[in-house]
Image (cartoon, coloured by chain):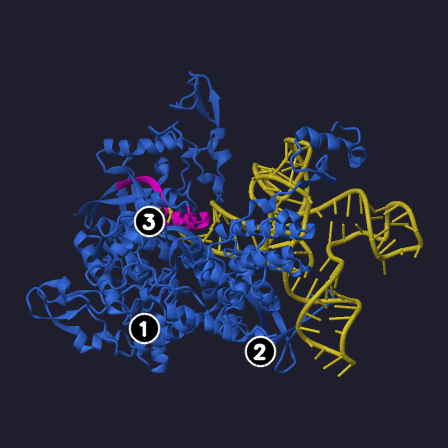
Chain colours: A blue, B yellow
Amino acid sequence: MIPYNHKSIEAAAQSQWSAGDVYRVTERVDKKKFYACSMLPYPSGKLHMGHVRNYTINDVMARYLRMKGYNVLMPMGWDAFGLPAENAAMKNKVAPAKWTYDNIAYMKKQMQAMGLAIDWSREVTACKPDYYKWNQWLFLKMLEKGIAERRTQVVNWDPVDMTVLANEQVIDGKGWRTGAVIEKREIPGYYLNIVRYAPELLEHTLTKLPGWPERVRTMQENWIGKSEGVRFAFPHTIKDASGTLVQEGKMYVFTTRADTIMGVTFCAVAAEHPIATHAAASNKALAAFIEECKKGGVAEADMATMEKKGMNTGLTVNHPLTGESVPVWEGNYVLMSYGDGAVMGVPAHDERDFAFAKKYGLGIRPVVFPEAAFKVCGPSTGWVQSAECKPDNTFFEVAGLREDWFDLSEWNSKYAEKGICYTHEKLGSKLDGSSSDRAIEMVPELIRTQGYFAEKKTTYRLRDWGISRQRYWGTPIPIIHCETCGAVPVPEKDLPVVLPEDCIPDGSGNPLKLHAGFLNVACPKCAKPAQRETDTMDTFIDSSWYFMRYCDPQLNTAMVGKGADYWMPMDQYIGGIEHAILHLLYARFWTKVMRDLGLVKFDEPFTKLLTQGMVLAETFYRKNADGSMEWFNPSDVDVETDAHGKPVRAVLRSDSQPVMMGGVEKMAKSKNNGVDPQDLIDAYGADTARHFTMRAAHPEDTLFWSDAGVAGSYRFMRRLWDYAQKITEQIKTAPSVQNWKDAPDTVQTTRREIYATLQKASFDIERIQYNTVVSAGDILLNALGELRGTDDHTKALIAEGLSILLRVLYPVTPHLTHQLWQQLGYAAQHGDLLDAPWPEVDASAMKQDHITLVLQINGKTRGELVVSATADKAVIEAAAAQAPEVELYSEWRPP
RNA sequence: GCCCGAGUGGUGAAAUCGGUAGACACAACGGACUUAAAAUCCGUCGCUUACCUGCAUAAGGGGCGUACCGGUUCGAUUCCGGUCUCGGGCACCA
């Protein structure tokens, strides 16, 4: 018997597929379309297990749906711009372009070796001009529409790399790569007004994405961060030392707790706020403090733990309701980028304000109290009347509020709760007696009555998307800077602005600044010598619409066309949870912009989303003498187990010395616990790799790597192969059977089991529970393997069962099943396995003359009852009543 | 701090609507084959050995068991309330 040889089987299947160009799809109207797509990879060098898992899920789905008669698109592309290419260039003195294209070539080969059903004619590479031309084109459209604009804003600046860094790239106030202290800098750049779309993005998150996981939707909601509140003005007059009026103006603040407005004892502004800047001009100590605040990263996790610091600006503003003079402080906890960069300080009802007031000895004035702090009295006795307090129009009376309710020495989260407004007698307020919610409604009107600005306002946490990067390897921003005309957009006819591919960055800034051929250009407006913008676009732009380009990959007259009309919106998107916010939000935003420009007709790009789980593996390490950790790859370590198979000790194979077990972690370079899929495919084949990754866990759950599990999958491949070899001749001569009623009981039982398993597999593959579909393959093979007879019924059942088995397993392990399908002669009967129909459940096989019911007495299983399948309720109850178990266990309770 | 999600054998996990918990596999153990090993095949595999029958650590029966406590139900891994633990997201957002 020929042994299972994954190499020759997989190579043969793949060459047949590629020779037939079988995965190319067109926009056919005679079939229902299905667009299943994975998040495109960054070409970092080679595939990792996360890729293998992602694309296998995608491939199983694509192959299955094709069997179900869908016109299925499964494309692939490359997120080819980005920092790693520049870093690699610096290290190896290779141009980022070459490094990137080499990686793409290698990874593409790996994908082909995995046997993925990708239509490669639609490949999209983000660093090629025919793709990024449309990034530039749409950017110019956004400029026209005012969605994109040039703005000078505070950013994280790495002084060594001379570039802006994203917040995530600032660690403990230092650049992640250089270790340089990050400065906050105000530099010009381009911003996309995603905040304009915040209301729609939020609403559609709730209404138009039922096919998304709940938690991704929640994460997006939180990220957009809607707050409803009141924006109002504190009027102020700034005078110089001699008392002469310098400036008359308004300081705007936003608050969600306008009901606490009577408790304002100070205001605080951000370092970049104009009032702070003004005050600093004549106050050196303040100027120095503001500088200090401006420095240091704005990484938000750090800010949260930072100590609250402040300094009095010496300036005051006026309370819009009381006219009181309120001191303005500079506070390091106030963000310029949220609201108006200034806050009202209510120490009694806000934890941050409380800490700030404690530290600097500012007043604390409680003005909102829980209902329990009031006594309810009759109509004539109370003096605080609530408009809504009680239906019988009773009154609230204060019951020793200050002493009982507030302990001003320490913060308590209950102080921030809403309640009933009550102001100190001396102040008095129209809010007194109102609930917080009612007071919030009243405040804007009250302020306006005083003649000052106030409005209800919704503010979002989401910030505009800064897309300028002081980097080389990205889409050039199509702008020309002219001394006389300013920033001039590149005319559409001159697109694309092609990025030179011959630059080798050396870490000393953007090489485009030194590239004369790129840099120097005539101004499109006045034709005088001018210079190109050297900033490039954030690479998240590339990934915001590539999935639409797959639909019209060769179109050179437009960004998208008929293909996108046909395929979009995408039916199923598959990728890692790490993109739950940024990429998915940007892509949704980009889609809405394209819709508003009339390019597409839908609101949301991804109908269904599947976030695959992480791949984890055991870690092993040793602590070196200097305290550093050395991590060892699991493939170099032997694990010893106790009698129960529990790991007790691990030993490094090379020196037979013990290593520590570090627990299970996400596969990562830093822990050296990654498994190279290439090694796996070489040793066991793509089918085994696919089988294991599908079997080990539900696609959305974390997958624990197990070498033994991989060996188990390989064993299954071999068992299936060996079994098929054994019965090849028998299958070819198997008779066709019409009447299964005459078959021996064991054959009928097995046939029933086969169809029951098929039914379960059909259900599970629909709901993307591929792990149990793989199990169904095991069950089917076990069931067939137990059939020993040589009668016609047995032979026919083996032939029938194996054809089901091959089709159930085909989406997961296409190579082996493809080979056996041809070898066993099924191809002649059902056609090529690619388009063979998914097997149908034979309902007659599931029918039984007698069925076994489980006898439960008081909820406990006590026995079994065999009744005729046609028996009605009365017959069954009668039979049950006679069962001996009933008497035994029913005790005194009625049946 | 706020918001999600998850806790089932030695391990990964199944259980479609509330109806036989642990399918399928991994590991382990016992056996067959082999000079031997590997591979393969067969078998056992939640706890309870002071719950009962038994010579018994066999076998059968009973009881318990899906993180913990409680509730609804004839019946709960599944529904409800509370607690704990783990994982993830957000976090000076006014």
The chain identifier of the residue carrying mark 1 reads A
Q: Percent position (x, y) of residue A831? A: 45, 60
Q: Nearer the viewer, residue A638 or A412?
A: A638
Which of pointers 3 and 1 lies earlier in the amino acid sequence?
A: 1
> Same subunit under labels 3 and 1?
yes
In the image: residue A722, left or right of residue A87:
right
Which of pointers 3 and 2 lies earlier in the amino acid sequence?
A: 3
Residue underneath mark 2? A624
Q: Report whether residue A140 is seen.
A: yes
Q: What is the number of the mark on residue A604?
A: 3
Which of pointers 2 and 1 lies earlier in the amino acid sequence?
A: 1
Distance from disc 3 to disc 1, alpha carbons, whole Å, reads: 38 Å
Q: Which residues are magenta?
A: A211-233
The chain identifier of the residue carrying mark 2 reads A
Q: Percent position (x, y) of residue A796? A: 60, 57
CA neighbours of label 3 inside 10 A, class few (<14), some (14 to 19), many (20+): many
Of the residues shown, which amino acid type is indicated by label 1? Asp
Q: Percent position (x, y) of residue A512? A: 23, 74
Asked whether A224 falls inside the magenta stretch, the response is yes
Residue A579 occupies quadrant: bottom left
Are the two marked residues, 3 and 1, in contact with CB atoms closer than 8 angstroms? no
Of the residues shown, which amino acid type is indicated by label 2? Asn
Of the residues shown, which amino acid type is indicated by label 3? Glu
For the residue labelled by badge 3, is the local secondary structure a helix, a strand or a loop?
loop
Residue underneath mark 1? A161
Q: Report whether residue A44 is seen.
A: no
Residue A521 occupies quadrant: bottom left
Asked whether A758 falls inside the magenta stretch, the response is no
**Image position of A228 with respect to A287: above or below:** above
